[in-house]
């Protein structure tokens, strides 16, 4: 067992609130770190993960609780292994197994934020376009699906590898030495299309230059890129750099992460969880177990990505509690722009979404044969990293069921619909068009501010306003009716603003099929 790093022990003893390292010296309790520690500590070897063989290309999940990496510990070939963060430590790694691992080499890999897709590098396969290509595999009930080549819009006759996926699933970044680059290996990006991936584009200057750029990692914030380069000046053969993309898609000049991440040797393959507090990377520096080892290090504020929040939870049947396979839509409330469309795990109904801070989001969940459900989330920057949790329980489309249409907003003291309501109303239109046998009653409710007579009138007018929108967008009037109930049936207290907000609601009640 390795000795504790003297400096880290001293810092833990001096800084209140930091919990001592466990006996394996591979993590701190709950990853509690301070910037002071980040500036002074040496990288820490993941002793429960590393072996005397090469262990490299770590890819930590957005949640920070799963770690995937490559190793040649079980033979001459490189395979993928997996470890979970449980009981305040990384557990002993196990191989991912077939069909992803084979007798040939599987190099670096990336896993999507929702944990349902793996894209990885494989070399020398019969269906390859070049020496090494990128392949994709999806999570299925039995484990992982048979890998598929990503095709010639992504792969080339050269070398293609080191993938990383944006948290919204819309972009694939990777390294390639294909024709048309700046020289050596460049970083490229392919957009997600309705069917597969679009043509890859070179990231250009100032990211790429005449030397090699490798092992990109796009943080879940969607704008912070970490990568290794031999051509931007540095301490060794390959150094780790950081660049930020602005609102126009332009990349900032790369910033060297400096020591102790970078050394006179090769430092590459790294990953940062959504929280942005740690960097995991592989290095062949002195003091390791053998070949490349995997290390972690706290990041100082200057090197951290932008603030994000994560939203995790599950989708299930309201009555039976059975997990559901569901489509999730993430929208920007202010514009109605669809930002991502992840799906739940088909077996567990669970989901995981990253929400960059500084926006208000609408999250809607749909499943076949069920009414949709929506929520609204404000993610302010000043609150820092947040872990939000929400379990959605969907109602079956049967007579007598009621479900709230949450993301419908009216102007203050008015029945005028705000523009932010349009995406939710369009979902209601689609639900009724997809289920032409349904008849519904639109029910409006109010809080207790004002007289009972006024609230009854206002809730009635708002219910009829929703009915009019549905009719104007192709739903037959005979399938609809509307009624306001005022403040007569509250679902929360009318004392707090949050309670009053919950009482100002619109519900659909199924009255026939």
Image (cartoon, rainbow, N blue to C red):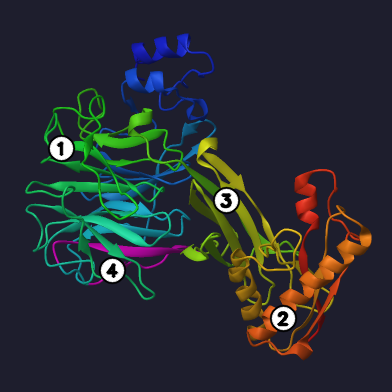
Residue tagged by mark 3? Answer: 312
Disc 2 packing (10 Å; few <14; some 14–19; many ≥20): some
Residue tagged by mark 4? Answer: 150
Q: Which type of secondary structure does the marked residue at label 3 adopt?
A: strand
The reply to whether residue 102 is visible in this rendering is: no
Place of residue 473 in the rendered image (x, y in percent of width and height, measured from the top left):
63, 84
Q: Nearer the viewer, residue 180 or 63?
A: 180
Badges 2 and 3: C-beta atoms under 8 Å apart? no
Mark 2 vs 3, N-terminal side: 3
- Structural distance between the alpha carbons of marks 2 and 3: 35 Å
Disc 1 packing (10 Å; few <14; some 14–19; many ≥20): many
| Residue 136 against residue 473 in the figure, above or below | above
Mark 2 vs 4, N-terminal side: 4
Numbered disc total: 4
Closest to the camera, between mark 2 and mark 4, is 2
Closest to the camera, between mark 1 and mark 2, is 2
Residue tagged by mark 2? Answer: 468
Residue stretch in magenta: 130-151
Closest to the camera, between mark 2 and mark 3, is 2
Closest to the camera, between mark 4 and mark 3, is 3
């Amino acid at each position: 067992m390795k000795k504790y790093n003297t400096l880290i022990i001293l810092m833990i003893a001096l800084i209140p609130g930091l919990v001592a390292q466990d006996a394996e010296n591979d993590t701190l309790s709950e990853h509690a770190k301070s910037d002071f520690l980040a500036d002074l500590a040496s990288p820490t070897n993941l002793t429960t993960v590393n072996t005397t063989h090469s262990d490299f290309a770590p890819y930590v999940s957005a949640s920070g609780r799963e770690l995937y990496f490559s190793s040649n510990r079980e033979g001459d070939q490189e395979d993928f292994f997996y470890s979970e963060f449980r009981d305040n430590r990384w557990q002993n790694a196990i191989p991912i197994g077939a069909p992803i691992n084979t007798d040939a080499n599987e190099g670096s890999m990336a896993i999507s934020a929702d944990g349902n897709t793996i894209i990885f590098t494989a070399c020398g396969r019969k269906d390859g376009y070049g020496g090494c290509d990128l392949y994709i595999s999806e999570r299925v009930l039995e484990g992982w699906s048979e890998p598929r080549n990503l095709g010639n819009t992504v792969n080339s006759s050269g070398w293609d590898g080191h993938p990383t996926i944006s948290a919204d699933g819309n972009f694939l970044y990777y390294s390639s030495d294909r024709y048309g680059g700046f020289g050596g290996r460049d970083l490229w990006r392919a957009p997600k299309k309705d069917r597969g991936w679009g043509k890859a584009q070179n990231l250009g200057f100032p990211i790429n230059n005449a030397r090699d750029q490798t092992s990109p990692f796009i943080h879940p914030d969607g704008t912070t890129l970490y990568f290794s380069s031999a051509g931007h000046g540095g301490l060794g053969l390959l150094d780790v750099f950081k660049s930020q993309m602005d609102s126009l898609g332009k990349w900032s000049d790369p910033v060297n992460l400096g020591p102790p991440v970078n050394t006179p040797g090769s430092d590459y393959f790294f990953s940062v969880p959504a929280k942005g507090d740690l960097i995991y990377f592989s290095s062949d520096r002195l003091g390791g177990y053998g070949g490349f080892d995997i290390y972690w290090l706290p990041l100082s504020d200057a090197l951290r990505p932008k603030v994000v929040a994560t939203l995790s939870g599950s989708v299930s049947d309201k009555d039976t509690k059975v997990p559901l396979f569901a489509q999730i839509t993430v929208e920007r409330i202010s514009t109605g722009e669809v930002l991502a469309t992840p799906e739940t795990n088909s077996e567990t109904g669970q989901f995981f979404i990253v929400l960059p801070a500084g926006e208000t989001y609408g999250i809607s969940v749909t499943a076949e044969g069920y009414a949709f459900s929506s929520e609204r989330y404000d993610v302010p920057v000043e609150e820092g990293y947040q872990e939000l949790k929400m379990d959605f329980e969907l109602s079956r489309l049967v007579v007598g069921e009621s479900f709230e249409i949450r993301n419908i907003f009216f102007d203050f003291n008015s029945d005028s619909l705000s523009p932010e309501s349009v995406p939710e109303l369009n979902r209601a239109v689609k639900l009724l068009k997809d289920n032409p046998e349904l008849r519904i009653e639109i029910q409006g409710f109010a809080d207790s501010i004002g007289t009972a007579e006024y609230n009854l009138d206002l809730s009635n007018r708002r219910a009829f306003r929703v009915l009019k929108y549905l009719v104007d967008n192709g739903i037959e009037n005979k399938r609809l009716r509307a009624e306001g109930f005022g403040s007569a049936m509250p679902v929360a207290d009318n004392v707090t603003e949050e309670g009053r907000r919950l009482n100002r609601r619109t519900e659909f009640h199924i009255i026939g099929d």
